[in-house]
Structures are given as structure tokens and as C-alpha cells.
Amino acid sequence: MTDYAKMYAKIGRIMGTLTPLRADCGRLCDHSCCKGDENTGMRLFPGEESTLPVRELDNGVRLVVCGGSCNREDRPLACRIFPFFPTVDSRGRVYIEEDARGKRVCPMIGNSDKIIYDKRFFRALRRVGKILAKDPACLEFMTEATQEIDTYRALLGE
Ligand code: SF4
Ligand code: SF4
């Protein structure tokens, strides 16, 4: 059994304060990924807890419903890594990819060639992805997310 509290504490230490850019990307878009309301939110990973309000949907998905503001230290993993995601292939190998599900929201998606990213963020996220992929529930969550991302990409014609 995975000790989730320990695992997410380690993940938190690995990600630290890293973000895709060295600067605050929210200035590009007026923080458009944080315009939540009581019906939208960011998904928690399996076993991830949050000090923010959480809503559980009928299908068991747990969403952080933040209303658009939070203490940065309290934001869930999905927010820390957006607009990227640790996707997996059928053998459980981890790849860091743009999360096409956020294409309408995030101006960074699709513009990687014009942006100078902080490489440390991607190294950290890859380490995090490998840790997550060792837990069966997280691996399943990542596999489903990978399929969703692929579907969005296909719909967007990429
Ligand atoms: S939408 Fe993208 S660019 Fe804007 S704050 Fe969120 S991650 Fe940064
Ligand atoms: S939890 Fe925080 S970082 Fe995540 S969407 Fe809400 S306000 Fe933004």
C-alpha cells in the first residue's frame, strides 16, 4: 500500500516552487486557469488530499473547487504542473506533454517553440511522474488522462 501522505510530501518537495516559466505566467493571461467557480475545478490525483474545498463527482472524481484563489502552497498537484501532464505509454513509461485539455484556457499550449521554459520544472515533473506511475491507482489515473489528452489533441487536429 502506498503511503500517500509521504508520497505527496515528497512530490511537493521535488516540485518546490518550480513553474514552467521562471516568471509568473499568469501575467500572460490574467491567470485564466484560476477562474474557477463552484462547478469547475482541478482534479486531485488518487490519494491526494487538499486543504481547499473538494467536491466528489458521481464517477468518483474529486475536484478542488477553489473559487479562483488559493494560497500558492495549498494548490493541488494538477495546478502546480498545469499546462503540462506526465502522460504514460502502455509500458508505464512517463513523458511530459502539454495538456491539450487546457488548450482553450492556456496561451502557453501550442506555443512551446516561442517560449523559453525553465528546464528544472520539466526535470522535476518527470521525477514526479515516475513516482506517481509506481502507484497503481495513480498509473490508472495517468493512463486515463493520457487517453483524454490524446482525444483532445485529435479533436484539435494536432
Ligand atoms: S492559463 Fe497557462 S499561462 Fe495562464 S496562468 Fe494558467 S498556466 Fe499560466
Ligand atoms: S487551486 Fe489555486 S492554483 Fe488551482 S485553480 Fe484554484 S486558484 Fe488556481
Image (cartoon, grey):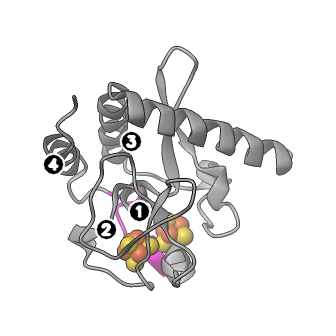
Mark 2 residue's CB less than 8 Å from ligand 2? yes
Q: Earlier in the sequence, mark 3 or mark 1?
A: 1
Mark 4 residue element: helix
Residue picked out by circle 3: 122
The reply to whether callout 2 and callout 1 are in contact (CB within 8 Å) is yes
Residue 120: x and y in percent read: 30, 44
Q: Which secondary structure dominates the residues rendered in magenta?
A: loop
Q: Earlier in the sequence, mark 3 or mark 2?
A: 2
Q: Earlier in the sequence, mark 2 or mark 4?
A: 4
Residue 144: x and y in percent read: 59, 38
Which one is in front in this view, the residue at disc 3 or the one at disc 1? 1
* Circle 3: residue type: Phe
Residue 76: x and y in percent read: 34, 62
Instruction: Measure the C-alpha gap from mark 2 to mark 1.
Output: 6 Å
What residue span does the magenta drawing correspond to? 19-27
Q: Which corner quadrant holds the N terminus?
A: top left
**Residue 26 visible in the current orientation:** yes
Residue picked out by circle 2: 75
Instruction: Measure the C-alpha gap from mark 3 to mark 1.
Output: 15 Å
